[in-house]
Image: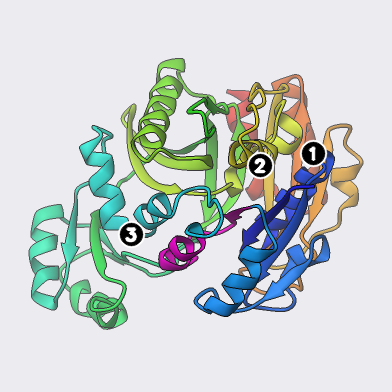
Amino acid sequence: MTTVGILGGGQLARMLALAGAPLGLRFLVMDTVADACAGQFAPLLVGDYRDEAALAEFASRVDVATFDFENVPAESARWLGERVPVFPSPHALAMAQDRLAEKTLFRDLGIPVPEFADVESRAGLDAAVVRVGLPCILKTRRLGYDGKGQFRLHGPADLDRAWEALGAQAGTVGLIAEAFVPFEREYSVVAVRGRDGAFRAWPLTANWHVDGVLSASLAPAAAPEALAREAQAHARALAERLDYVGAFALELFCRDGRLLANEMAPRVHNSGHWTIEGAETSQFENHLRAVLGLPLGATAMRGHACMLNWVGAMPDPLPVLAEPGGHWHDYGKAPREGRKVGHATLRADDAAVLAAALERVGAALSREAQVAPAVAALSA
């Protein structure tokens, strides 16, 4: 029986283990904390990702390794890759960990991006702002996620405060200034590439965020077919350049009908959770198929689907479970402000039926604002 090792024991690892059970797979999860929620469904090895003794034990017990978050040290993935197959590759992981390298790769591939500039010093911040313009966003090149490690600059008076907030990290994880994009829509394309180079993508997904954290995802997005094809073409170009193996997401802004790449997530992605019930093959199953060298499953939709993220604490599940197409996912985490603790997916064959279900759930849970953008998109 094949054992898949997963570096990182969060909800993504948990859902990978659940998806792999019907395939007859075993799992070993490695995380730095003993209460990692994936440990509720798979054996858990607790250790630091830079601890070679812990990594050696991990490698000795698995046949192939992957990860559930992009902040696993790339050098640890490289060390592990010398002992067992690791997918996606440590090179792809390292590229996605550095916003400057990532944006440069997008540009080299002809994928449109907002203007950006490297920032190494306070004077360098002044020069970067001249280049990218105001407003802009100062970000850490590494380690930021869900809106963390960012500072928005509206005018010249913000430069000192931005440097005070993030400047100390210029010499460690690095900084990048990116032009602010007053986008009309946020999209993502979740895709998968196999060991043999086979490529599949799920339908374009529309996303809405609150305070930098994903709130809702709707698929298929109400977008022109040409835009969806362009997004998938960008994802394919990235996957082929990186010789990527596994599932990933490309996050995109849409402004005046034009797509601009924001970032790539080298793993299964929050905006693809709807695929569990809403697609022929979920992103989790296809990721496992890819890293194991198995044929990829179909990514066609089953009607329409909307994922609602639960952040901080879980709401009452009954309104979701009362819906014919309602599906509930509790990650088994303790409540905490800002923490992703679960999600729900509502699915229907008809857009109007899904919109009505979302309205009922939103009203029952006092989440009208959360469901409103998806309802409007479905009703347009």
The residue pinned by badge 2 equals 288
Q: Callout 3: few (<14), some (14-19), or many (20+) C-alpha neighbours within 10 Å?
A: many
SS class, disc 1? helix
CB-based contact (under 8 Å), mark 1 and mark 2 = yes
Residue 67 vertical position relative to residue 21 in the rendered view, above or below: below
Residue at 92% in and 41% down: 322
Separation of marks 1 and 2 at Cα, in angstroms: 9 Å
- Give whichever of 356, 61 is nearer the camera: 61
Q: Amino acid at mark 1?
A: Leu
Residue 102 vertical position relative to residue 36 in the rendered view, above or below: above
Separation of marks 1 and 3 at Cα, in angstroms: 34 Å
Please tell me in which quadrant of the rendered image residue 203 appears: top right
| Residue 138 x/y as whole percent | 27, 65
Q: Amino acid at mark 3?
A: Asp
Q: Report whether 98 appears left or right of 278.
A: left
Tell me, for residue 23, which label it has, or none.
Answer: 1
- Give whichever of 288, 345 is nearer the camera: 288
- The label nearer to you, 1 versus 3, is 1
The residue pinned by badge 3 equals 98
SS class, disc 3? loop
Q: Amino acid at mark 2?
A: Leu
CB-based contact (under 8 Å), mark 2 and mark 3 = no
| Residue 221 x/y as whole percent | 55, 28
Tell me, for residue 290, which label it has, or none.
Answer: none
Q: Which residues are magenta?
A: 64-80
Separation of marks 2 and 3 at Cα, in angstroms: 25 Å
Q: Report whether 83 appears left or right of 312.
A: left
